Amino acid sequence: AQSVTQPDIHITVSEGASLELRCNYSYGATPYLFWYVQSPGQGLQLLLKYFSGDTLVQGIKGFEAEFKRSQSSFNLRKPSVHWSDAAEYFCAVGMNLEYGNKLVFGAGTILRVKS
Amino acid sequence: DGGITQSPKYLFRKEGQNVTLSCEQNLNHDAMYWYRQDPGQGLRLIYYSQIVNDFQKGDIAEGYSVSREKKESFPLTVTSAQKNPTAFYLCASSIPHKGRGRENTEAFFGQGTRLTVV
């Protein structure tokens, strides 16, 4: 079955430190992958996406992610975290269905930033 | 501005009542989705629709119903049969994949409705 695993429920980093959020997926076909961010009580905003080509993708707010097929991973990184990055982050894999497509989400990682 | 509007933002329901959550989009997207979010469980798909007058069950459709009479609108009804309806509900839309490139599968989300059973 298709699934997405985010091993870390919570992560705390100091402002200015680097960040890596882990994501592993299980999907038989070539995946297309997403990272979304959610502030409390809000909807989801797309940070970046991978469909094909260069395995290192750049997104908004200084985030990047690297697709590693051999490890079935799509980890999110940021070189220097800002206090405003505190939020919940979701990794998702897109699936093709007979009637369109859908996203399968991981359980999320809550990022806390300490000053 | 184009986007997805969910209303109301907060909704309270008595046990045994049906309630309907509104979702409207002006992005001209064909596909629309309803997700349920519970703490620590991510988002789970309730229903989705790729075209007007057609919709499919997602992973947790029991106790929910939808309609898609207009391209812009995809209301979700939480029925009294839903045993644990208290949750955060998110509506999304996208251009459907079928017949188009994979790059069109990005989903855009509304701001959500928090439903509480009292």
Image (tube, coloured by chain):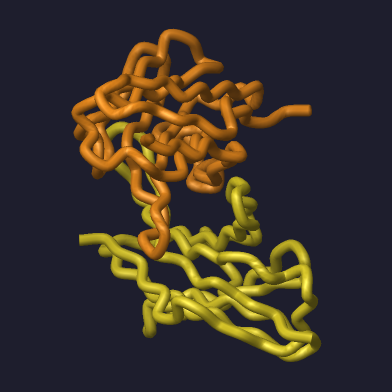
Chain colours: A yellow, B orange
Q: As rendered, which of B68 and A115 lies closer to the eye?
A: A115
Percent coordinates x, y for residue B51 in the rendering: 41, 20
Q: In which quarter of the image is the N terminus of chain B?
A: top right
Residue with the most extreme front position: B118
The quadrant of the rendering that contains the C terminus of chain B is top left
Residue A22, x across and y down, in percent: 48, 80
Residue occupying image coordinates x 50% and y 30%: B11
From where the camera sits, is residue B77 visible? yes
Q: Which residue is drawn at 74% across and 90% down?
A: A17
Find residue B42 and report its image quarter. bottom left
Residue visible at 54% across and 79% down?
A21
Left or right for A22, reference A72: right
Residue A25 to residue B51: above or below: below
Position of residue A7 measured from the top left corner of the image (x, y, whole percent): 40, 80
Q: In which quarter of the image is residue A56?
A: bottom right
Q: Looking at the rendering, which quadrant does residue A29 occupy?
A: bottom left
In the figure, is residue A30 to the left or right of B84?
A: right
Q: Give the percent coordinates (x, y) of residue A96.
A: 34, 46
